[in-house]
Each structure stands twice: as structure tokens, then as C-alpha cells.
Amino acid sequence: MTQTPAEASQSTLSPAAVGEVRAAHDKLRDEIRRVIVGQDEVVEQVLMAIFCRGHAVVVGVPGLAKTLLISTISRTLGLAFSRIQFTPDLMPSDITGTEVIQEDKGTGQRHLKFVKGPIFGNVILADEINRTPPKTQAALLEAMQERQVTAGGVRHELPDPFFVLATQNPIEQEGTYPLPEAQLDRFMFQIQVAYPTADEEFEIVRRSAVKADVSVREVLSIDDIRRVQKLVVQTPVADHVIRYALRLVRATRVKEPMPNRPKLVQDYLAWGAGPRASEYLVLAAKARAILAGATHVTPEHVRQIAKPVLRHRLLTNFNAEADQITTDKIIENLLEETPVEGASQEERRMMDKVMKP
């Protein structure tokens, strides 16, 4: 008998399946730590994006090991890694590939052959994506959305799994082409990479002074990744959790009337998040839950993932810039003032504990 969507959302994953994913996640984390110092939350969010079949944009100053991080993750997952350095003269065909004339030496006949570009990999690092013109950006974003490249009227499927991590430098703005909000919305996460702590920086310098060649081993195969992706989708989520995620997203839409809207949202937002934010918020909460060893999603999992899902989908107004109010502060205010209706008493107690400073 086929389950309805409501019945499927109330079912649970087997503890064995969840334990298998948790064990694989712990192995991944331990292997990545052999190369990467700190940045645990960044690693976690990148892995969640991969397991959700999403993409991410990373914002951080140069020198924070973004390239090393993503290449290390790709090696531990046994995935093909490509790095594309975006420059003002980069053309769409430099990314997707191009057709070249090839001559058959036996018959002398000529025909067009498609030569694949660097986009044909499993993990793609789009370095400084805001330094290339919109035409080239659009070519990448189209490949992300459709998971295919069209050349000469022929469709070429991209590998599966396929994940794009785009980076942006928040300091240098001259000669850049900022991604429009509609294109940023295609990224599941915006991940903020902060400076390392004093202890972490000490360890980084200590390791670099030794110049040790540390290699990582493959922890998960492509089949394992696909299995985790399937389990993430199957992770059950109750209706009251979905409604909570929707309330968070809909509260950001300041153009729509809503009673008791959080003050920072009302005063400092010019535009809110769209329906894709609601989808990604629930999907990311599923990944957070299963990687934490839970068999179902709670409102706390939604709260934990709200910032990377929402921060690049909120457009602030001039008052926010004048008062130095960031989208992260607005999201914090949104989480504080949005109640978790329909939750159990135990979940309410957990939420009250989390909400306290």
C-alpha cells in the first residue's frame, strides 16, 4: 500500500540506517581534520550541501584554506575535483566545453567533436565567481540548475553527484560583477568562513613549519554518497516542523501583511526570502538531523541551519547599512521572536533552553 505524503512524513528511519550515516560522518570529519585545522562548522555545512544535492557559496577573505578544504573533502569522498579561476576574460565555453573540428585520417572527413570543460567533475570550486561577467556566471548557474550542458543542440549530462562551491571575496569590490539575488537564490547555503582562533592559527603555523605531507584516504564511495542522499530525503519531518520553517520564511516577506512581525525584520528588510528558501530550510534540517544521529527532524534542527539558508536571500535596506545591522542579526531576531507552535512539551523545553542567551 502506498503511503501518502503526510503518512511518510510521520514515519521514522531505522536506527541502523541513521547509525550507519553517523558513523560515516564521524569518519569523514576525523579524516578531514588531518589536513584542515578548525572550521568544523564550515566542513559540516559543505557536507550537508553535498548530501542534499545542493550547492553553496562561500564568503571569506583570502588565505583561509577554502581551496584546500574543498579539495580535501572531495578526496575523502572519492570524487573528481575541478577548480575554475574566474577572471574578467573567462568565456562560457572555458567552463562548459567547446566543439572542435576533428578529421578522420582514414576517410578525410571532418566532424565536430565536443571537448568537455572543467565543469564535468563531481566537485567544482568556482573561485571568485563575482570576478567574471554575467554571461559566464549564467553559464555556470544554468549547469548547476539543469545538471547538464548543451552544445551544438546536443545535451551532455554532468556527473552524479555534482556539487558547486563558489567563493567570493568580501573585501575587494572593484572590477567585480556581484551575483544578482535571483542567481544567489540557486545556492542552497551561503557559508561564512571566519578567521581561525589563536589556538587554531598556532596549530596551522606549527604544521606548516614541519612541512609534513599529509595524505587522506577515501572514506565514502560514490555509491555511499548516493545512499546518504537518499536517506536524507527519506528522513521524516512532522507537519508542525514544516509549519515552523514556513513561518520563519514568510515572516521575512515585509511586503506582505503579517501581525507581530519581528522588529528588526520590519525595520531593516527591503525584501524577503522566496519559496525555495522554505524547501531548502526543511531539506537542510533533514541533513542536520541525520548527521546528528536523529531519526526525525525537530524545530531545533531548523533553527541550527537557518542562517546559512537565509542570509543570502534577505535584502536589507539603507537603514540596515546605516545602523550596521547584518542579515545574521536579523535572522537571530527572527528566531527569538518566532514561536514553535505545535511542538511537544519536551521540544518546547529544549527550544526555551536554546533561546536563552
Image (spheres, helix red, strand yellow):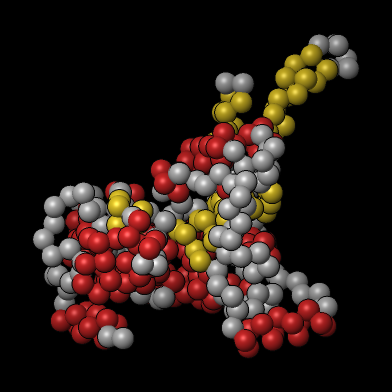
**Which quarter of the picture shows residue 319?**
bottom left
Q: Position of residue 3 (x, y in %)?
A: 22, 53
**Which quarter of the picture shows residue 150?**
top right
Q: Residue at left 19%, top 56%? A: 6
Q: Residue furthest right?
A: 105
Residue 50 seen in the figure? yes
Towards the viewer: 15 or 298: 298
Q: Is residue 275 left or right of residue 45?
A: left
Q: Position of residue 340 (x, y in %)?
A: 19, 71
How many numbered circles are shown? Answer: 0
Q: Position of residue 232 (x, y in %)?
A: 40, 61
Q: Is residue 210 left or right of residue 68?
A: right
Q: Residue at left 35%, top 56%? A: 318
Q: Position of residue 181 (x, y in %)?
A: 41, 46
Residue 208 lies, with reference to residue 219, above or below; the image says below
Q: Residue at left 58%, top 61%? A: 171
Residue 297 seen in the figure? no
Residue 128 lies, with reference to residue 152, above or below; the image says below
Q: Is residue 186 left or right of residue 303?
A: right
Q: Residue at left 59%, top 75%? A: 195
Towards the viewer: 321 or 269: 321
Residue 220 lies, with reference to residue 167, above or below; the image says below
Residue 22 lies, with reference to residue 46, above or below; the image says below
Q: Quadrant of the C terminus?
A: bottom left
**Which quarter of the picture shows residue 148?**
top right
Towards the viewer: 279 or 62: 62
